[in-house]
Image (tube, coloured by chain):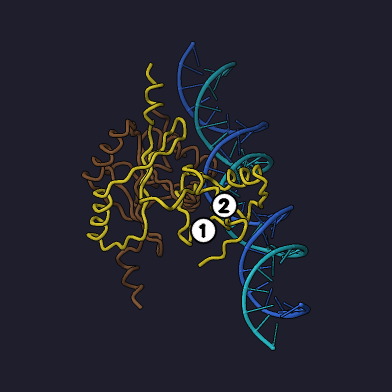
Chain colours: A brown, B yellow, C cyan, D blue
Amino acid sequence: MIKLTAQRQAILDMINASDRHWDADELARSLSDNGQPIGIATVYRGLATLEAAGLIESIQLADKKRYERADKAHHDHMICTVCGDIEEFAHAKIESLQLSVAAEKGFTVTGHQLVMFGLCERCSQGEQK
Amino acid sequence: MIKLTAQRQAILDMINASDRHWDADELARSLSDNGQPIGIATVYRGLATLEAAGLIESIQLADKKRYERADKAHHDHMICTVCGDIEEFAHAKIESLQLSVAAEKGFTVTGHQLVMFGLCERCSQGEQK
DNA sequence: TTCAAAATGATAATCATTATCATTATTGCG
DNA sequence: CGCAATAATGATAATGATTATCATTTTGAA
């Protein structure tokens, strides 16, 4: 079990307290704003440690990595390219098909990431000309 | 239709001539080695232009973007985390399930990326203790 | 307490990518 | 044809996320 230092606990609490997908910088700023100043390097290290321990999860986007709570069922993401909103979805059949495709090729799956890009419901309506 | 300058043509030829997944730096080096010196900025711009024109495709990995030929059927990727090998796969059912999930949530899909990480057949055998 | 290992934080370094800007090439158009 | 407007190139600086470094602080066990 990892050591939950004050800093790591603060990061974990912040992530657990919301449904957001945080990046390192947002966490550092938010913690500082809440009277918990924390070095940015500590945030990066803390996030890596917490993720390795399975206490948080992440998705790797093009530019940066974002972290979210781990106490949910496994899911993938749909990201709105207009407003940046990240929605979650789960589909057991997609998951099992992935594994079967991999198995056919002798590939041992240790992880996967499925992201759909597009417009969320709100943005696609606003987009109406 | 875009203008196929000598540099863009050279990039396109290099990509079309193989099944590799190239990054910008590899292309610049490889072109230079083939007597086609090209500025790295031009490579980045050329890749973006060629991709926008649909002449090449890309996958965004954690660290860098890699480009590949576009003259193949749509497919996704399995990446071996040991040797870095990138295998391709296609599965129509997975694709259609993605779209149906998105539709349920009112999400308009403009693109997606599915990557499985793990061990390719060769590396998982070598891994036997 | 006391010392070693681990963690932190400020900051430098890294690395892919993008921006800048001066130079070069290309494309009409008269 | 010849030149001006436009686009492309390339060297290099800038950016931004992340990691490395290293001195300092904290923690934990003996």
Which labelled disc corresponds to residue B11?
2
Question: What is the number of the mark on residue A1?
Answer: none
Residue B91: percent from left, percent from top: 28, 46
Q: Nearer the viewer, residue A38 or B102?
A: B102
Displayed quadrant of residue B89: top left
Chain ID at mark 1 = B
Q: Nearer the viewer, residue B60 or A58?
A: B60
Q: Is residue B8 visible?
A: yes
Q: If you read the primary sequence from the N terminus, does the residue marked by circle 2 or circle 1 appear first?
A: 2
Q: Position of residue C26 (x, y in %)?
A: 65, 68
- Residue A82, above or below B57: below
Mark 2–mark 1 distance (CA, rounded to whole Å): 9 Å
Q: Is residue A106 above or below residue B69?
A: above
In the shown orientation, is residue D4 left or right of residue B82?
right
Seen at 62% across and 58% down, the residue is B6
Nearer to me, A47 or A112: A112
**Please, what is the three-letter code of the amino acid marked with disc 2?**
Ile
Q: Which residue is mark 1?
A: B50
For mark 1, give the secondary structure: helix
Q: Position of residue B125 (x, y in %)?
A: 37, 22
- Marks 2/1 in contact by CB < 8 Å: the verdict is yes
Position of B73 with respect to B27 (left or right) is left
Q: Residues within 10 Å of mark 1 (few under 14, many from 20)?
A: many
Residue A23 visible within the image: no
Q: Residues within 10 Å of mark 2 (few under 14, many from 20)?
A: many
Which residue is at a point 36% across and 51% down the rendered structure image? B73
Could you tell me residue B28's position as x and y percent?
Answer: 62, 47
Amino acid found under the numbered disc labelled 1: Leu
**Point 44% across, 50% down: residue:** A61
